[in-house]
Amino acid sequence: MSQSFDARQLRETTAAESAPTPAQFRQAMLRHLQYTVGKSPQQASLFDWRMALSHTVRDYAVDPWFSATRRTWDEDRKRVYYLSMEFLIGRLLEDQAINLGLRDVMVQVLAEFGLSFDEVAEGEPDAALGNGGLGRLAACYLESMATMGCPAYGYGLRYEHGLFRQHFENGRQIETPENWLATDNPWDFTRPEAAYPVGFGGELHDHDGASIWSPRSKVLASAHDTPVVGYGGQWANTLRLWAAMPSADLFNLDRFNAGDFAAASEPEALARSLSRVLYPNDTTEGGKELRLSQEYFLTSASVQDILRRYLAAHDDLLKLPEFVAIQMNDTHPAIAGPELIRLLVDEHAVDFDTAVETATSVLGYTNHTLLPEALERWSVGLMRKVLPRHLQIIETLDTQFIALQGQAPNPVRLISNDQVSMGDLAFTTSHKVNGVSALHTELVSQELFPVHNELHPGRIVNITNGVTPRRWLKLANPSLAALITDTIGAGWESDLERLRELEPYAEDPAFRDAFGRSKRQAKEHFTGWLAAEHGIELPAEALYDAQVKRLHEYKRQLLNILWTIAHWQRIKRDPQANWVPRVKIFGGKAAPSYHMAKLIIQLINDVAEVVNNDPETRHLLRVVYPPNYGVSMAEKLIPAADLSEQISTAGMEASGTGNMKFALNGALTIGTLDGANVEIREHVGAENFFLFGLTTEQVGERRAQQGHSRAALEASQTLRDVLQAIAEGTFSPEDHHRYDGLLETMWNSDWFLVASDFEDYDRAQGEVADCYSDPEKWQRMAILNIARMGYFSSDRSIREYMSQIWDVESAL
Ligand code: H53
């Protein structure tokens, strides 16, 4: 490159300005088919077409990607780094095409080749590098940061196997490995030049009062980049995923030459295991060590990369907070504090206290749960084994934290009971700590971190979660999106508060009819897919009542299926009554080692088997549980739903984001006062929301009452009849004892208060049915839900992170 080369001469056009004509797009695609894929149109398979199409779309992402990167350097902008062990991205082709303004031209050109876009796109594997809400939130936030012109990087791991695939055998969940990288990933740019050694284990030596860490082994983190384009194609950021590569010195050539091939490759295999699977089973010591090593691997590679980028343009590390904001997504990357301190102290000769202050100013921590089992604690022994230098730093931070608490008789500690509390560590090394809904943040302040909160008033802030309307409305629900655009004009996609303009149309019969038609289309799209993919046929004229999310006792899929049984029993007692036909839709995976969650899955499938084959009730009640719920299924299912089940025990769901996606697509919510349900209800109006259940405070009181489960059951004949049917083996004729454990829990403990909330849930479900029988009323409520959901755009959340935590400006 010559000295006089001016980078600005490169194309600076944004997507909107450079939208191709169909002829140009067609030509570009044919070029890729021939020269990238190596096929002619006559020979090309659907896979080949998808590759050619993806490369064509990707080309248009590169221009905004280059210009955004260049501007960030030229203008020396502050950058945000979002560290997350999970990114639940889903498919990228249509998402990128929409944001680049290419969807219509793409669909048209494919049609000219006799191809349907859906058919071509269906082959794209879901990038399922996450479990549920937290990972999907990270994906929405990346897309919103790009849309808002916030210079940012997402940092994660490039797991070879994402979240397991689920199928059912005799109603039981079976897990098989997911293999999203089995074929070429067209969105992946390999960056072998961006590689960092990450050390593990080894010894500490004292040298002139300073600690020198000599790790026992080193693994290389090698970068793979994906451009993430914002809506309108004006800005693009990078998702950088680290793959583990054994460093050359791990391979023992002597052993290999001596014929001991397996032993020669063992350290190599171990190194590779770091990015092999998402969430290794951590019930064993080995599994725990792998998980902690994965977290450190992500964090260390990212922090090294961040410092390298900073030092390329600056030399004063103390000014780091002016140019760098690092967000820790849950405690998983909480080792970032000690790692940044270590690098500043050990490698850049910054004094310890200054290093702590600098790190704290740079770091932010988002808490996504109050559940003790999800707030990580690592044993001191394991920490010492894997990260001895970090343990030493944490010990110093612990001493300082205790001193800060003065004479407190029982000070909070970062290390207690021989365990390092990653939540407390994350708090002390962050300048801002946020919860993810108003209620959750309140509980984070009062119950999780009361002492920290008193020591650092103002450090805790609330940022209620949001979802991207591009994927969750424009992409997922094209008929509703088109109706909205026809009614209020374009632009709502990046200014979601504009949905308010729909409010008056709730009174317009023509608009309500059009809304009804769009819901019907979404149902047909979903049922068409369900029939083709799973051979499940569903009636179109029914209330679609959906609960899709991870299986967890606190989310109470059990409450839902028990009510379903009660409903079935009632229909059977009076088949001629005026029942509203319902389809109960379930979806979601249980952690492989979570026995109770798996039993609940089996119960749902067992109930489905009986209910769906009952000729007396078939036309009035169906239960479906399509396996392997994920982002792509959600895109089809959510727009089709009439009713959204958000029924967790109050105080347990930090926020929920599925609740937002459903309401945005015009489903009404039946829900408790939990997580973001509280704010959704405030926004859409209490009269447009089916509320039931105990409040957080009442949950606490009820749990304290001895024998509450038995008392609640004694008060509900309906629920007793349901449990009786289960106990008699109505749904498990071949094994009457299958659900004994579950029934025992219901009678004797019921920590999640299924029995306590059952009667009120039943009442609310009755209201749902009454309301659905009045289509005009239902549609009015649904439209008002859509119109008032603007607040829950992830653009709003990101704006709040930018101003309240990151102190970063939009470049647009
Ligand atoms: O994070 C979502 C919340 C949801 C919460 C979820 C979550 C995970 O998916 C994984 C770990 C964790 O600590 C929390 O359960 O309520 O909506 C995004 O904030």
Image (tube, helix red, strand yellow):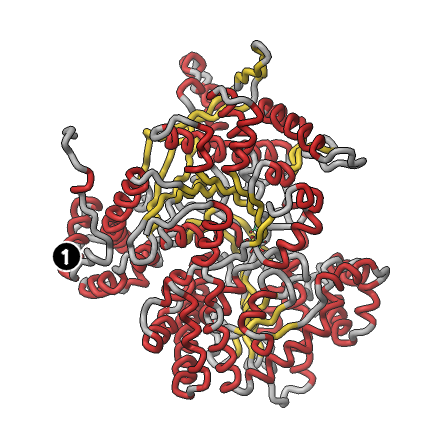
Q: Residue furthest top?
A: 208
Q: Nearer the viewer, residue 17 or 754?
A: 17
Q: Nearer the viewer, residue 365 or 608?
A: 365
Residue 369 visible in rendering: yes
Q: Amino acid at mark 1?
A: Gln
Q: Quadrant of the N terminus?
A: top left
Residue at x 55%, y 86% (from the top left corner): 773
Residue 164 placed where, x, y %?
Answer: 50, 48
Q: Nearer the viewer, residue 634 or 361?
A: 361
Q: Residue furthest right?
A: 706
Residue at x 63%, y 55% (from the top left corner): 440
Q: Is mark 1 within 8 Å of ligand 1?
A: no
- In what element is the residue under mark 1? helix
Question: 489 left or right of 256?
Answer: left
Residue at x 75%, y 36% (from the top left corner): 411
Residue 76 placed where, x, y %?
Answer: 33, 38
Residue 221 in the image: above or below residue 42 = above
Residue 160 visible in rendering: no
**Badge 1, how many Cα within 10 Å: few under 14, some, many 20+?**
few
Residue 351 placed where, x, y %?
Answer: 54, 22
Question: 166 left or right of 288?
Answer: left
Residue 11 placed where, x, y %?
Answer: 18, 46
Report the number of numbered marks.
1
Q: Nearer the viewer, residue 758 or 404?
A: 404
Question: 579 left or right of 781?
Answer: right
Circle 1 sits on which residue? 24
Residue at x 60%, y 64% (from the top left corner): 605
